[in-house]
């Protein structure tokens, strides 16, 4: 059990978990139904029929279970509202996947794939600018500290490109969300706690180490993760980078293996007629071929468990991660799982909130734009004066790191 009460839909009207259960999840399920039906229509008879059937099953789950706040199947006593938000949200994506998995023709279908690829296409200008920037950084002998901050911050703001929130955002909110990260200087003041200096001290000492990314969203966010990883390799801090991805469509936009390779191929294809991008993608491909970059999946990432349970639930993954020199966790869901998604006092130190991972585990940096209530690591000053509630969600970010604690 978490050390504090967990967030749940039953926190009541006006809370973000409540809005999530009553509005955002229904809207995400409707999106899945629509995309499933559209995909089914492209298919011939038997497959089309099965696709329609899956869409109907999703509709049943929405109408008869979620909207009626029925008890969760397979779990006694808890409903969609009363079970922990983190657990229930993971359960919903697992249920969608289960419907696909037991089918004959749709087991590999990702109902979110089209959304993810169009997210990448929609950010062409920034992608070209970043290709230029990394090409220059790799070719020149720039100040490593400054480059680390630039690429890590770009990587952080890439997390604002998650698609699970778009389901219920207004147009202006979506535009504002998308523009975050366009101007790093301006965005810096929106980082409520910024430990990147601390993170840099740990990375600076890491020479040809293994650095891990527990990735989040596909498309633009994946692109900025790769840019950052590219810099870590070219600056000799990493000789290996391991990317941890999801095994199926998860929280709408999370990166799966097909998404990862789609992006590489798309960049290599030179559709944008931009040689820097093509060269970059060629280099990335060679990193994968030579094993400098390793793309990995593990079923643990698509469970509802908090990362406090990683050692007991996925001992092989836990042991493997312990060989890393530094782990970057990307995004909101990873933050929620690291901190057990429970009601910590907001000034709780990050090292405390990650529980067992604060010991006998590599240094962790989490790069997260805030999209859920749980928050830790705030100073008293920010807590009282500078952190109005409406800033907590959506347009602020956190870059928390525990390496200083580990070194002492
Ligand atoms: O509530 C917002 C939300 O959908 C959360 O459910 C989830 O934690 C998050 O957004 C997904 O965001 P990210 O892609 O950053 O993990
Ligand atoms: Mg995500």
Image (cartoon, grey):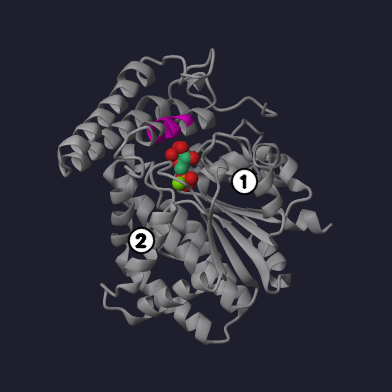
Q: Position of residue 290 (x, y in %)?
A: 54, 74
Identify the secondary structure beneath mark 2.
Answer: helix
Spatial CA distance of label 1 from label 2 is 41 Å
Answer yes or no: is residue 390 visible. no
Q: Position of residue 291 (x, y in %)?
A: 56, 70
Specify the label residue 382 is tagged with: 1
Task: Classify 136 as above or below 115.
Answer: below
Check if residue 122 falls in the magenta segment. Answer: no
Question: Farthest top residue?
Answer: 77
Identify the secondary structure beneath mark 1.
Answer: helix
Q: Label 1 neighbourhood size at 10 Å, few (<14), some (14-19), many (20+)?
A: some
Residue at screen point 65% across, 48% down: 317
Image quadrant where residue 27 sits? top left
Residue closer to the observer: 163 or 260: 260
Residue at screen point 26% across, 33% down: 33
Q: Position of residue 292 (x, y in %)?
A: 57, 71
Quarter of the image with the N terminus in it: top right
Q: Work out whether mark 1 precedes mark 2 in sequence or the reverse, and give the earlier one.
A: 2
Q: Provide the major secondary structure of the magenta segment.
A: helix
Answer yes or no: is residue 55 visible. yes
Q: Which residue is mark 2?
A: 262
Question: Farthest bottom residue?
Answer: 140
Task: Classify 184 as above or below 406.
Answer: below
Residue closer to the observer: 185 or 316: 316
Magenta residue span: 91-97
Q: Nearer the viewer, mark 1 or mark 2?
A: 2
């Amino acid at each position: 059990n978490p050390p504090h009460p967990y967030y749940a839909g039953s926190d009541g009207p006006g809370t973000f978990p409540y809005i999530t259960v009553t509005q955002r999840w229904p809207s995400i399920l409707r999106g899945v139904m629509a995309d499933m039906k559209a995909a089914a229509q492209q298919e011939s008879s038997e497959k089309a029929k099965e696709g329609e059937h899956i869409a109907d099953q999703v509709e049943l789950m929405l109408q008869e279970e979620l909207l009626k706040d029925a008890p969760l199947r397979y779990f006694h006593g808890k409903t969609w509202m009363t079970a922990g938000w983190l657990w229930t949200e993971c359960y919903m994506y697992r249920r969608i996947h289960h419907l696909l998995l037991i089918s004959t023709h749709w087991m590999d279908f990702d109902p979110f794939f089209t959304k993810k690829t169009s997210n990448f296409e929609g950010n062409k200008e920034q992608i070209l600018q970043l290709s230029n920037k990394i090409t220059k950084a790799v070719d020149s002998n720039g100040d490593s500290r400054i480059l680390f901050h630039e690429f890590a911050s770009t990587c952080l703001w890439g997390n604002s490109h998650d698609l699970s929130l778009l389901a219920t955002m207004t147009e202006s909110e979506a535009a504002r969300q998308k523009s975050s990260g366009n101007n790093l200087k301006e965005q810096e003041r929106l980082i409520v706690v910024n430990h990147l200096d601390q993170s840099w001290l740990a990375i600076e000492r890491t020479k040809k180490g293994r650095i891990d990314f527990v990735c989040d969203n596909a498309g633009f966010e994946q692109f900025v993760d790769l840019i950052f990883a590219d810099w870590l390799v070219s600056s000799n801090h990493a000789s290996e980078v391991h990317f941890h991805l999801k095994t199926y469509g998860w929280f709408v936009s999370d990166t799966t293996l097909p998404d990862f390779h789609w992006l590489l191929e798309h960049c290599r294809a030179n559709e944008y007629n931009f040689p820097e991008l093509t060269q970059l993608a060629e280099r990335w491909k060679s990193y994968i071929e030579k094993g400098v970059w390793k793309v990995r999946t593990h079923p643990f990432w698509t469970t509802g468990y908090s990362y406090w349970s990683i050692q007991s639930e996925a001992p092989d993954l836990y042991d493997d991660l312990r060989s890393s020199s530094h782990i970057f966790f990307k995004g909101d869901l990873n933050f929620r799982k690291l901190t057990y998604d429970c009601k910590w006092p907001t000034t709780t130190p990050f090292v405390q909130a990650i529980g067992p991972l604060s010991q006998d585990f590599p240094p962790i940096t989490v790069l997260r734009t805030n999209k859920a209530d749980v928050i830790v690591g705030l100073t008293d000053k920010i807590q009282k004066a500078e952190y109005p509630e409406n800033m907590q969600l959506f347009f602020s970010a956190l870059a928390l790191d525990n390496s200083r604690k580990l070194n002492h």
